[in-house]
Image (tube, rainbow, N blue to C red):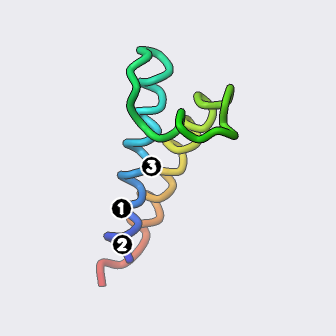
Amino acid sequence: MKQLLELLGFLALVQGGTGLLHEFTDWHIGLVQRIGFLDGYEVYASVALIVLAFALFAAAESRRSG
């Protein structure tokens, strides 16, 4: 369970980072900008993904390794 939470946290961190990178550099990477209902809210969604990633990392850290 701990490894799953860490993996999900890593994926959320990468997608949030690439979403911000897309917004500020106009590189066409990441999944956030490809989701239609997030048009105009990509920065907020990317920041929310980064916050979610840190929450998942904290939850993984609170779990026992067994």
Q: Secondary structure at mark 2?
A: helix
Give the image quarter of residue 5. Answer: bottom left
Looking at the image, which residue is at 68% across and 26% down? 40
Residue at which label 1 appears:
6
Among numbered discs 3 and 1, the one appearing first in the sequence: 1
Q: Position of residue 19 (x, y in %)?
A: 47, 32
Q: Is residue 22 left or right of residue 6?
A: right
Q: CA distance from mark 2 to mark 1?
A: 6 Å
Q: CA distance from mark 3 to mark 1?
A: 10 Å
Residue at which label 3 appears:
12
Return the residue found at the far top. Answer: 25
Looking at the image, which residue is at 67% across and 30% down? 39
Disc 2 crowd, CA 10 A, few/some/many (<14, 14-19, 20+)? some
Give the image quarter of residue 46. Answer: top right
Looking at the image, which residue is at 63% across and 32% down? 44
Q: Secondary structure at mark 1?
A: helix
Q: Position of residue 34 (x, y in %)?
A: 53, 37
- At label 3, which amino acid type do we have? Ala
Among numbered discs 2 and 3, the one appearing first in the sequence: 2
Nearer to me, 32 or 63: 32
- At label 1, which amino acid type do we have? Glu
Q: CA distance from mark 2 to mark 3?
A: 15 Å
- Circles 2 and 1: CB atoms closer than 8 Å: yes
- Circles 3 and 1: CB atoms closer than 8 Å: no
- Circles 2 and 3: CB atoms closer than 8 Å: no
Q: Quadrant of the C terminus?
A: bottom left
Give the image quarter of residue 27. Answer: top left
In the depicted structure, whether residue 51 falls above or below residue 9: above
Q: Position of residue 20 (x, y in %)?
A: 47, 27
- At label 2, which amino acid type do we have? Lys
Disc 1 crowd, CA 10 A, few/some/many (<14, 14-19, 20+)? some
Residue at which label 2 appears:
2
